[in-house]
């Protein structure tokens, strides 16, 4: 037992891996169809942080590829998935999974320009 664990009165060290695995089983997958074919996105509690970061950057194609797998994502693209449809899909996923409005996700800031000389 570590000194930190005994100092705060806890006899066990919290194992994030075990807790996260238990939480990943919570929630329901998000089923959807595209061009008549069934698909499913796993519950948000099981998403890798890298997929969530991709969503927050607005990189929805990378996020969806990570969530459904490259082969499934390629099939969606081969069937003609468009950007507008991808945006609608993630909006519906966010609502169903309790993620809030993805339109308010943090976006990458534009580089700030600095004046290098005085205006005359």
Image (cartoon, rainbow, N blue to C red):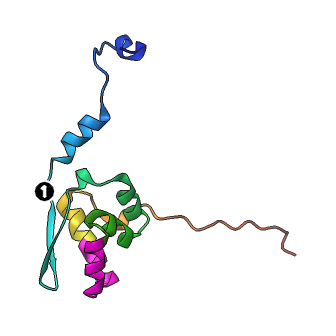
Q: Is residue 38 above or below residue 1?
A: below
Residue found 14% across the figure and 52% down from its top? 27
**Residue 81 magenta:** yes
Q: Is residue 105 visible?
A: no
Quadrant of the rendered image containing residue 83 = bottom left
Q: Is residue 103 above or below residue 84?
A: above
Residue found 54% across the figure and 64% down from its top? 109
Quadrant of the rendered image containing residue 96 = bottom left
Quadrant of the rendered image containing residue 37 = bottom left
Quadrant that contains the N terminus:
top left
Percent of width and height locating residue 66:
33, 64
In the displayed image of the protein, which residue is found farthest to the front? 71
Query: Magenta segment, which residues?
Result: 71-89
**Residue 28 magenta:** no
Percent of width and height locating residue 78:
29, 86
Quadrant that contains the C terminus:
bottom right
Front residue of this view, candidates 96 and 50: 50
Front residue of this view, candidates 94 and 52: 52
Percent of width and height locating residue 108:
51, 64
Front residue of this view, candidates 47 and 113: 47
Helix, strand or loop status at disc 1: loop
Residue found 28% across the figure and 55% down from its top? 47
Q: Is residue 100 visible?
A: yes
Q: Is residue 28 above or below residue 20?
A: below
Residue found 35% across the figure and 11% down from its top? 6
- Which residue in the protein does label 1 denote? 28
Front residue of this view, candidates 7 and 50: 50
Q: Is residue 86 above or below residue 47?
A: below
């Amino acid at each position: 037992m570590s000194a930190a664990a005994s100092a705060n009165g806890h006899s066990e060290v919290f194992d994030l891996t075990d807790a996260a695995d238990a939480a990943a089983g919570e929630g329901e997958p998000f089923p959807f169809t595209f061009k008549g074919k069934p698909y499913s996105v796993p519950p948000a509690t099981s998403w890798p942080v890298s997929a969530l970061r991709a969503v927050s950057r607005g990189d929805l194609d990378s996020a969806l590829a990570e969530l459904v797998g490259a082969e499934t994502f390629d099939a969606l693209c081969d069937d003609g998935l468009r950007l507008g449809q991808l945006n609608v899909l993630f909006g519906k996923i966010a609502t169903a999974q309790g993620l809030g409005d993805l339109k308010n996700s943090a976006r990458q800031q534009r580089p700030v320009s600095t004046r290098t000389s005085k205006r005359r």
